Image (cartoon, rainbow, N blue to C red):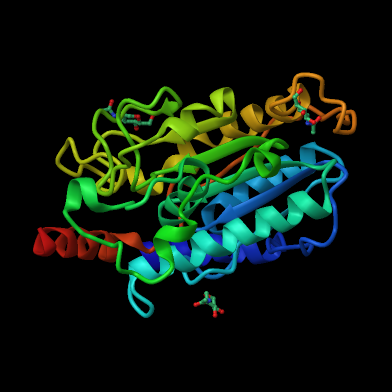
């Protein structure tokens, strides 16, 4: 069943030509989107690709770019992969904000990709120690760049969307979904992300073993965020795009094109995230290190 699902979705994705379409050197006239995929998803936008593809069809002059980080659990190991991705996302957004100061951005991350995304917007070294007891301060280079991106870089970011963030905090005001607990690597300081106000949402459902350790894992909510919330996220991001960035004046951004409001179709119940195995592996890794 899984292989059939994977095959079907992979076929749909390749038929739709989902890939990074433009390099950061091109400034989007509409919305520029950056996507960080989850653990073990093939290079590209992954499951989140379905969402950003619909948005790019709804806002003229929009495109998206997938962050080309390992997204691995092993080889390189999860922590190094997160470090790589955190740095890469930071460089990509910083460079884009400098090259395209008039362009609005939205940033998406799924699972491990959500962790690298929130690393950049929330900051907070050492990232993983509070819950798991893992001291990562000695992982070269990781802590130094795990600081919130400065305002001159984030001022045109209209939306940050996290799905199943491992660093999810149960008390964040920007949470969506029905989880009641925090993630396996919950973040001690979320003040920078709270400061984004309406510009950030973190989706986490009850029983997701990565973002909600409050419950016994139940079903596979970690794989279902796009299925349950894809349409809601499309509407949210389009609305954020129209209503502007952190500056209410909005003088620095072009006037929005009129998105059409054709019904948004996001199909498929299961993603292609091959996390069931790595999910268990990460939980085992964490418990063995405690
Ligand atoms: C980060 O990962 C990418 C993709 O796997 C790889 O090409 C790149 O060399 C890595 N960078 C570092 C600094 O390890
Ligand atoms: C949480 O929300 C998801 C998505 O709507 C739903 O499938 C699930 O049953 C809900 N879980 C609980 C415990 O309410
Ligand atoms: C945003 O507002 C601040 C304070 O008013 C101003 O200094 C800054 O230049 C504005 N940025 C943009 C991009 O308009």
Q: Position of residue 224 (x, y in %)?
A: 41, 43
* Ligand 3 falls in quadrant: top right
The quadrant holding residue 205 is: top left
Q: Nearer the viewer, residue 15 or 68?
A: 68
Quadrant where the C terminus sits is bottom left
| Front residue (pair 152, 4) | 152
Residue 162's place in the image compared with 280, above or below, is above
Residue 151 percent location from the top left of the image:
64, 38
In the rendered structure, the answer to whether residue 112 lies left or right of residue 34 reads left
**Residue 135 image-quadrant placement:** bottom left
> Looking at the rendering, in which quadrant would you find the N terminus?
bottom left
Q: Nearer the viewer, residue 174 or 187?
A: 187
In the rendered image, residue 15, in percent from the top left (x then y), is placed at 69, 64
Identity of the residue drawn at 18% across and 65% down: 285
Instruction: Identify which residue is drawn at 52% across, 27% down.
Output: 195
Query: Could you say which quadrant of the image residue 277 lies in?
Result: bottom left
Q: Is residue 223 left or right of residue 28?
A: left
Could one spot residue 72 in this view of the protein?
no
């Amino acid at each position: 069943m899984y292989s059939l699902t994977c095959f079907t979705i992979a076929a749909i994705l390749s038929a739709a030509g989902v890939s990074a379409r433009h390099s950061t050197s091109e400034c989007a006239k509409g919305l520029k989107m950056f996507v960080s995929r989850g653990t073990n998803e093939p290079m590209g936008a992954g499951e989140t690709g379905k969402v950003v593809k619909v948005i790019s069809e709804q806002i003229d002059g929009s495109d998206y770019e997938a962050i080309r980080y390992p997204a691995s659990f092993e080889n390189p190991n999860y922590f190094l992969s997160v470090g790589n991705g955190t740095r890469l996302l930071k460089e990509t957004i910083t460079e884009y904000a400098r090259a395209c100061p008039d362009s609005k951005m939205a940033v998406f991350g799924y699972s491990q990709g959500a962790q690298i995304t929130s690393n950049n917007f929330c900051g907070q070294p050492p990232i993983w120690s509070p819950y798991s007891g893992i001291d990562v301060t000695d992982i070269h280079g990781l802590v130094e760049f795990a600081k919130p991106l400065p305002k001159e870089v984030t001022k045109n970011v209209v939306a940050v969307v996290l799905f199943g963030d491992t660093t999810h905090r149960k008390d964040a005001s920007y949470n969506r979904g029905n989880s009641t607990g925090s993630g396996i690597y919950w973040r001690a300081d979320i003040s920078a992300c709270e400061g984004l106000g309406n510009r950030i949402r973190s989706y986490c459902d009850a029983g997701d073993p990565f973002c909600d350790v409050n419950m016994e894992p139940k079903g596979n909510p970690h794989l279902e965020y796009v299925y349950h919330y894809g349409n809601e996220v499309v509407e949210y991001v389009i609305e954020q795009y129209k209503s502007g960035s952190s500056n209410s004046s909005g003088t620095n951004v072009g006037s929005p094109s009129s998105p059409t409001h054709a019904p948004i179709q996001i199909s498929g119940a299961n993603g292609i995230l091959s996390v069931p195995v790595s999910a268990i592996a990460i939980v085992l890794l964490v418990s063995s290190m405690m």
